[in-house]
Image: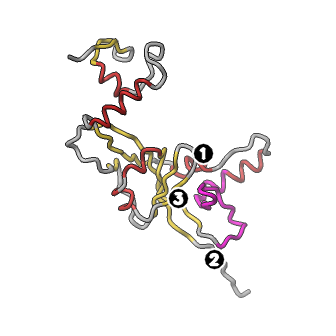
Amino acid sequence: MSFFVWCKNEECRIPGFRCLLCREDCYSLRYGSGQADGSLEILVKSGKLRERFVMKRKGNNVASIGAVAGEADVGREFESREEDAVQEQQGIFLMEDGKLKPFNRDDYTTSILYEVVEAYTVECRLVRPEDPGTVVYEGRKPSRKTVPICIRKNGECEMLSSWEDLETRPELLSDACEVVGATPLKQAFVLRRK
């Protein structure tokens, strides 16, 4: 027998499992902190529900990467912020210590640079166990010429070898806030005769 609770959003009585699926903390006083999340984990572990990850394509991909990748110092001057914004708009980043950092075109590096071509937000949906648990793309699928880089919620990045690798291991998306498709680049200098 299912129990019913009053939903503040829908303003009616709904079954208790729908309240768990909503994931909003409407009744924080009634439930202890994290108790509703624990019930949701129990449902997933028991096999009654299954997680499916949906990747939604973003329109303005480079600006969002700069917000996640670059740490902004409060004490910096206005000109340096404008300079960083121009560099982020170029979309070229350097993978350093597991994090994406904006790369200045005036600098020189021997390591591989990454130009961000596309970006996806990651959303977790709960589905029935008989539904496939594969990754679903909303919008255009990513280009196979790009390399996926998973940006986690703590700011760390994990680069995968191909999109097929990401599709075979969707559990990598459980802690990701977004996934970017980047093209590997090498810095080269061209000498021209005057």
Badge number at residue 116: 3
Q: Which residue is mark 2?
A: 188
Which circle's residue, 2 or 3, is located before the other in the chain?
3
**Residue under the point 42% across and 51% down:** 172
Q: Would you say the residues marked 2 and 3 are in contact, meaning their CB atoms lie under 8 Å apart?
A: no
**In the depicted structure, whether residue 191 falls above or below residue 36:** below
Reply yes or no: does residue 106 show up in magenta: yes
Q: Residues within 10 Å of mark 2 (few under 14, many from 20)?
A: few
Q: Which residue is mark 1?
A: 67
- Residue 84 screen position, x and y as percent: 69, 52
**Residue under the point 72% across and 53% down:** 83
Mark 1 and mark 2: span between their CA atoms? 28 Å
Of residues 105 and 32, the one drawn nearer to the viewer in this rendering: 32
- Residue 76 screen position, x and y as percent: 78, 45
Left or right, 107 with respect to 99, comes to: right
The amino acid on which the numbered mark 3 sits, given as a three-letter code, is Val
Mark 2 and mark 3: span between their CA atoms? 18 Å
Element type at mark 1: helix
Mark 3 and mark 1: span between their CA atoms? 14 Å
The amino acid on which the numbered mark 2 sits, given as a three-letter code, is Ala
Q: What segment is highlighted magenta in the picture?
A: 85-110
